[in-house]
Image: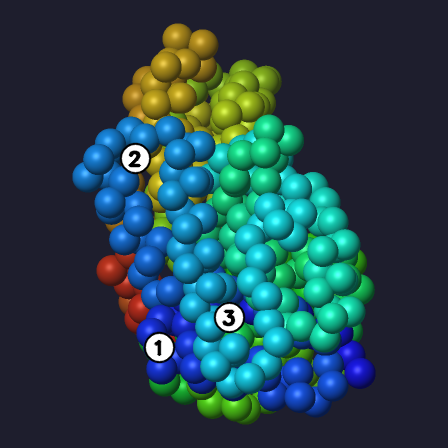
Amino acid sequence: MALIVQKFGGSSVANAERIRNVAGIITRAYQQGNDVVVVLSAQGDTTDDLIEKAKEINPKGSKREMDMLLACGEQESIALMAMAIEALGFPVVSLTGWQVGIHTSSSYGLARIYSVDSTRIREELDRRRIVLVAGFQGINRYFDVTTLGRGGSDTTAVALAVALKADLCQIYTDVDGVYTADPRHVKDATKIDEITYDEMLELASLGAQVLHNRSVEMAKRYGVRMEVLSSFSGNPGTIVKEAVKVEKTYVSGVAQDKNIARIAVVGLQDVPGTAYRLFSLLAKNKINVDIILQSIGRHNTKDISFTVAADARDACAKIIEDAKETLNYDHMDVSTDVAKVSIVGAGMVDNPGVAATMFEALYEAGINIRMISTSEIKVSVLIDKEDSERAMRAVHAKFFQ
């Protein structure tokens, strides 16, 4: 008998038919003698719908009250799923984040999990119940409901797997696993049987939407064995683990991210400490920066360009604008007409010429590169957003065909 944590995303529980399908998956795992803990996301577009309702009432509603509202979606899912499992004749209980004892920071809308009290779940498992847990949420020291940000249900599932010392954490989605590229955009993309934590973390951070990067980071830290698989097909999925077969290709996948903005700060003083003042200011305001490019100094000035998430664009621009006298720059340019295309692979470090092959693919497709960022296991380029789909297909073809 094993202890399995399963997580089902919003598309997997979007309607009554899909809820019944997932109830079948859960109960089959239970019938095999396993202890089963299940984390559920809100149904379909429920979270987006709740956000729109909030905007109708108050476009500037507080983050605390938004968390109170958004947590309702997952609570709805677990209650409906419990009813579906009850109808099949199996013992089940649904629990919210606070009932489970998921303790978080007080950063409403983007809380971090501090600890999980597994007592209540273990008591329910000892009664041989299937335990359903509302994903994406927890409770802070003030006993307020908090949410973990987009993709937070993945993080909930991994945190529970860690706390319960689960044998396996299964993340069910609407695709069969992790692919060499998004199969919705690249028809020749193929499923990867196994992938390392580091590769999966890079892909998740670079735009692949299969897993949330925080969940992968936690799984790597605590050695949680993960499997990404489909709630619709019943096929084996992709195993995420520390090491994989050595004969695998040196590039594991291609990812794109259109949800970014490029900010250029033009005419900064070309003196020591300029970059520090700029980026320490952004860090202080919790703005995450990705690709950075600094120009060669000219006439005692230099330009610094960098990318941020699109939803951080306005906040970032305001911070820099408010600090214009301190930073002493000429002007700032902001653009969202950009996208990032990346290749990821643990074997890249030992295979020279990988970046050149990627650049060759983009050259042959007539796509211009604006910025470049590299690490031991990834190469990212910033290009025009209108070219992103074509770029991803061209790069994928170069490495996988």
The disc, 1 or 3, on the residue closer to the chain's N-terminal end is: 1
Residue 98's mark?
Answer: none
The disc, 3 or 2, on the residue closer to the chain's N-terminal end is: 3
Q: Residue placed at 40% from the left, 34% from the top? A: 65
Which of 300 and 196 lies nearest the eye of the viewer? 196
The location of residue 49, given as percent across then percent down, is 27, 53
Work out whether 62 lies above or below 33. Answer: above
| Cα distance between the residues tagged 3 and 2 | 48 Å
| Cα distance between the residues tagged 2 and 1 | 44 Å
Question: Considering the image in quadrants, where does the N terminus appear?
Answer: bottom right
Question: Is the Cβ of the residue at disc 2 closer than 8 Å to that at disc 1?
Answer: no
Work out whether 105 lies above or below 347. Answer: above
Find disc 1 in the rendering and name its residue. 16
The location of residue 266, given as percent across then percent down, is 36, 26
| Cα distance between the residues tagged 1 and 3 | 12 Å
Q: Quadrant of residue 359?
A: bottom left
Give left or right: position of 395 versus 111: left
Find disc 2 in the rendering and name its residue. 334
Work out whether 256 lies above or below 30. Answer: above
**How many residues crowd around disc 1 within 10 Å: few (fewer than 14), some, or many (20 or more)?**
few
Give left or right: position of 136 versus 328: right
The answer to whether residue 353 is visible is no
Type of amino acid under label 1: Ala
